[in-house]
Amino acid sequence: MDFVPYRHKVQYYETDGMRVVHHSNYIRFMEEARCDLMEQMGYSYSRLESMGFFIPVLSASCDYKQMTRFGETLVIGVEVTALSPTRMTIQYEMRDDATGSLRATGETHHCFLSSAGRPISLKREAPEAFEYLRLLLGAGTTEKAEAKPEDTAKA
Amino acid sequence: MDFVPYRHKVQYYETDGMRVVHHSNYIRFMEEARCDLMEQMGYSYSRLESMGFFIPVLSASCDYKQMTRFGETLVIGVEVTALSPTRMTIQYEMRDDATGSLRATGETHHCFLSSAGRPISLKREAPEAFEYLRLLLGAGTTEKAEAKPEDTAKA
Amino acid sequence: MDFVPYRHKVQYYETDGMRVVHHSNYIRFMEEARCDLMEQMGYSYSRLESMGFFIPVLSASCDYKQMTRFGETLVIGVEVTALSPTRMTIQYEMRDDATGSLRATGETHHCFLSSAGRPISLKREAPEAFEYLRLLLGAGTTEKAEAKPEDTAKA
Amino acid sequence: MDFVPYRHKVQYYETDGMRVVHHSNYIRFMEEARCDLMEQMGYSYSRLESMGFFIPVLSASCDYKQMTRFGETLVIGVEVTALSPTRMTIQYEMRDDATGSLRATGETHHCFLSSAGRPISLKREAPEAFEYLRLLLGAGTTEKAEAKPEDTAKA
């Protein structure tokens, strides 16, 4: 599987009175990158929902390394770092697309829910989707996002 | 009926790189004030949804008069200015709570939908709620919001 | 001048409890498309700010035609429909990228401010930027955005 | 010092397609509660900024325990759990105001910056503000927020 790292161009409405991206928005960028990876896998959130599954966020954290400004683009590497039949951990690296310098790292923990809101074993209920995620273990887009920007296809 | 105007204290995450409230947020403040009025009437959006009705926004507009800064509080007057069995128009005045100076005015147009997404006559399907809205015609909280702040109960 | 219409892919955090894009976000999408057009012209908001100019929003309006769902992509045509030395009007057409069906139209009014917050004549203070905007009159990306999706370069 | 816990009423635009508060918004609620505590201390963020100080977020995390729905009110306890001349840690407990049940817990780490963006010792540069924060160590609003709702002053 060959995935393209996700890119997010910073919008004016994402900045705050310190003239940088408000810290809450990185949590949203992580969601964008996570959904993009799932879509590249062929299991978009929309498709999963229509299959009767949700992947809610159990916890989220973000370490802010450098501020990001309006007009800059973040390239976001995503990696599935833990997976069980009922749970998943994803890590994120957000870098400035122009310079490669690290802006933030993050992590989210997830479980798998039925549309009725009950915890399920994804392995049992959707073995094919689970198998795709298993193949992703340690094989996300982070390395690619770390590459020098001139080596990377622009979005 | 005696309604209290809605107050919104500006949060840091609502400011942008110009160090003022981002213009898109006034559309959200109007929603807050509209929902608050409905709740004061006894017909909260939650209750309406559980009764099987939605009141989607058909159009929204906002005129920005003065910038609003972090830490300031807006007092938002709301008035139902037009009502038919199938549609409603609401107008908004947003003022600085400390000085009374006008920050923005706005207007939203709405229809009434069933939970299946079909346009309905609120007058026929929920005559009591419609009657409440009819009593609101020209009788919202705008006048109260225009009053000097020292005459007004603080939230 | 040959501009590419702006595309916005709908994110999960942009949806609301009705499972569609919250109406306030269209005001943000209009900002995205406006900034993108300025950047395609060579006058990004960042560059304008570093030149000492701001283009605040005096008013904004949006007519909602159809709901937009998570995972869909909006293609947003932008057109400068009025321009004076001190003011500008921009119109927007937001269509589903897959089907071309119209989701929303919008309009924003703007003035030109110095970094000190004083209204200025852009024509006098930045004649070259003004001239670019003048060339845009009636020549934005709306027509391209109306084209069938298969005729249009994907973002 | 006697502080009142912060309350946030959930708005419709804060919900997502799962019909619950989007997880990124809890990071914003934590900012609201943090700013409110500082203001109750007499050191609002606005005042600190006018004194030449910023308190940026170095990291933020949130554990989601239960979903929160439109119309519900969160009561948010805040506690300063670590403080040094250059850094501060704050913890948060977010509970449903009606039932007291725990919805989320969170933590943020902060440093102190000059308006020029340089790390400073708050103890040296603003000893009085530092002293206030020191008094807050282990003495925030969390206990009060845990109290039964009928024992607590409503906002």
Image (cartoon, coloured by chain):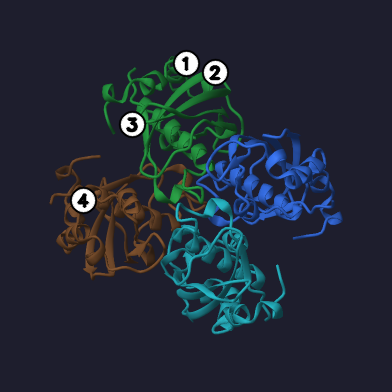
Chain colours: A brown, B blue, C green, D cyan
**Distance between the alpha carbons at the discs numbered 3 and 4:** 20 Å
Q: Do the dots labelled 2 and 3 sit on one chain?
A: yes
Comparing labels 4 and 2, the label whose residue is closer to the camera: 4
Q: Residues within 10 Å of mark 2 (few under 14, many from 20)?
A: some
Q: Which residue has dot 1 on it? A: C137
- Nearest the eye: A34 or A152: A34
**Which chain is mark 1 on?**
C
Q: Quadrant of the C terminus of chain A?
A: top left
Q: How far from the left and from the top, in percent, is residue C64? A: 53, 33
Mark 3: amino acid = Ala
Whether the residues at callouts 2 and 1 have beta carbons within 8 Å, the answer is: yes
Q: Which residue has dot 4 on it? A: A41
Q: Do the dots labelled 2 and 1 sit on one chain?
A: yes
**Which chain is mark 4 on?**
A
Label 1 element class: loop
Rendered position, C141 above or below D54: above
Asked if residue A117 shows in the view, the reply is yes
For marks 2 and 1, the one nearer the N-term is: 2
Q: Which residue has dot 2 on it? A: C82
Q: Which residue has dot 3 on it? A: C98
Q: How far from the left and from the top, in percent, is residue C12? A: 40, 50
Whether the residues at callouts 3 and 4 have beta carbons within 8 Å, the answer is: no
Q: How far from the left and from the top, in percent, is residue D146? A: 59, 80
**Distance between the alpha carbons at the discs numbered 4 and 1:** 43 Å
**Distance between the alpha carbons at the discs numbered 2 and 3:** 30 Å
Comparing labels 4 and 1, the label whose residue is closer to the camera: 4
**Distance between the alpha carbons at the discs numbered 4 and 2:** 46 Å
Mark 1: amino acid = Leu
